[in-house]
Amino acid sequence: MTKVIKNGTIVTADLTYKADVLIDGGKIIEIGPDLKGDEVIDATGCYVMPGGIDPHTHLEMPFMGTYSADDFESGTRAALAGGTTMVIDFALPSPGEGLLDALKKWDNKSTRAHCDYSFHMAITWWGEQVFNEMKEVTDRGINTFKHFLAYKGALMVNDDELFASFKRCAELEAIPLVHAENGDVVAEMSAKLLAEGNTGPEAHAYSRPSQVEGEATNRAIMIADMAGVPLYVVHTSCEEAHEAIRRAKMNGKRVWGEPLIQHLTLDESEYFDKDWDHAARRVMSPPFRNKQHQDSLWAGLSSGTLSCVATDHCAFTTDQKRYGVGDFTKIPNGTGGLEDRMPMLWTEGVNKGRITMNEFVAVTSTNIAKILNCYPKKGAVLVGADADLVVWDPEATKTISASSQQSAIDYNVFEGKEVKGLPRYTLSRGTVAWGDGKIQSTEGHGEFVARDAGMPVTKALSTWKELTAPRPVQRSGIPASGV
Ligand code: DUC
Ligand code: ZN
Ligand code: ZN
Ligand code: ZN
């Protein structure tokens, strides 16, 4: 049974043109005018784009004494309703737990996924077992390792561990990821705020100013450079971090930055003079910033110094957020966004002239597919690519509301926002998974996407070998040969 998407305009990261798309066996088999298929999907007035890829989700993640409320079932439903056809979730070993043991847990949870998915592996402690298992993890098709420089006493790794792991990534031609906030400084500031009686959710923002992110981003970039490995910085939320990334790029380093849709569109006023629940629901790390930081992130997307827009989808119910009444450090950190990332970015980005449609495709799908080594299977409208596609209606509107969302939580941080630009259909490997305003996919349809290590893009500017190779000592005026 073939399917044909007719009368639409194809929009990719580099081209915009009118053509039909013919699909068979879950793949695109032909692109051109006047194609015929057994089943017709009408794309009149719509753009046909690669399905979104969200490179940063935490589904059913054990965190801060609870589990994030959206699992692979509700989380991937939310993804599809918003035009996203692939998520990359973080397998998270608790400190001391083996990587392969953690991976088994994520394999089990993900059997319920509605759309395709892949994993990053988190490095939450260091030892011989971790060093050895990193190789087996890459053999399983996971070529990215995440490091937390925050969450002291829980997930945080120290610089010696970070350096060791980055060097291991270099050997395996894998890419390290970093959550860049200085965990030592955050811990000090949090303790001081609490001691002074600042227990409410707004103190969360005071405890992690943009400097803690700028410092950690720059540190991670320099350590990655010494290890001879590229670096992907997750949830870049401020100018200081963006500046460090820009500088590294200008110096020829392979460093990528990932702003979140939340940081692009919501600001710190959400924490101040608001009721406790309102502010606590928006507690995440890094916290929302001011307008200047938002302008910096938008500039990064249009200039190309920032590469991908993600969500860090890590949703907690109001009841879970209330674990932190009386102590802001106990409010589970995280917000949702899977369903809203693409409509919000289109509305605030494309409709407002901040980014083009092609840039929209690049930052929601194609760039990350290339970085993570799953392009052009994902992130492309090309013959042979998976038919993970979104038929995007630029005229469709809605008001975002928790009452109509797929997510399992009881609120939405974008509540009341009017969006213009929504998926009419979302196709997952050729199957219509979202259409006519409803989920049409089945639980378990999603498949794991293996991503090999060792693509050319992992070549860094300097390599550990070059940096540590014996070299002649140069003293003032004395030739190095020592004559
Ligand atoms: N930040 C969050 O807000 N939630 C999950 C993990 C993280 O780094
Ligand atoms: Zn993080
Ligand atoms: Zn409120
Ligand atoms: Zn995260």
Image (spheres, rainbow, N blue to C red):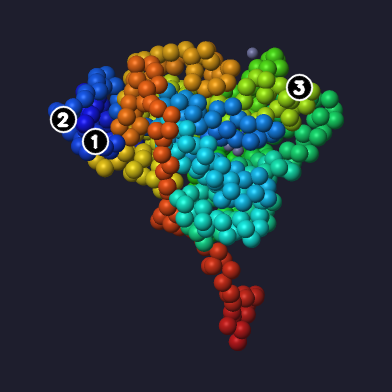
Q: Identify residue for label 1.
A: 24
Q: Nearer the viewer, mark 3 or mark 1?
A: 1
Q: Nearer the viewer, mark 1 or mark 2?
A: 1
Q: Position of residue 449 (x, y in %)?
A: 41, 43
Q: Position of residue 161 (x, y in %)?
A: 66, 55
User: Does the image show residue 123?
Assistant: yes
Name the residue furthest bottom: 483
Q: Quadrant of the N terminus?
A: top left
Q: Which residue is at 85% across, 28% downward? A: 196
Considering the numbered disc 3 on the image, is that residue within a helix, a strand or a loop?
Answer: loop
Q: CA distance from mark 1 to mark 2?
A: 13 Å
Of 236 and 414, which appears nearest the observer? 414
Q: Identify residue for label 3.
A: 325
| Residue 342, image quadrant | top left
Considering the numbered disc 2 on the image, is that residue within a helix, a strand or a loop?
Answer: loop
Q: Quadrant of the C terminus?
A: bottom right
Q: Identify residue for label 2.
A: 35
Q: Which comes before the other along the chain, label 1 or label 2? A: 1
Say what amino acid the circle numbered 3 marks. Val
Q: Position of residue 160 (x, y in %)?
A: 68, 56
Q: Position of residue 125 (x, y in %)?
A: 66, 51
Q: Which comes before the other along the chain, label 3 or label 2? A: 2
Of 357 and 153, which appears nearest the observer? 153
Q: Which residue is at 24% across, 41% downward? A: 383
Q: Residues within 10 Å of mark 2 (few under 14, many from 20)?
A: some
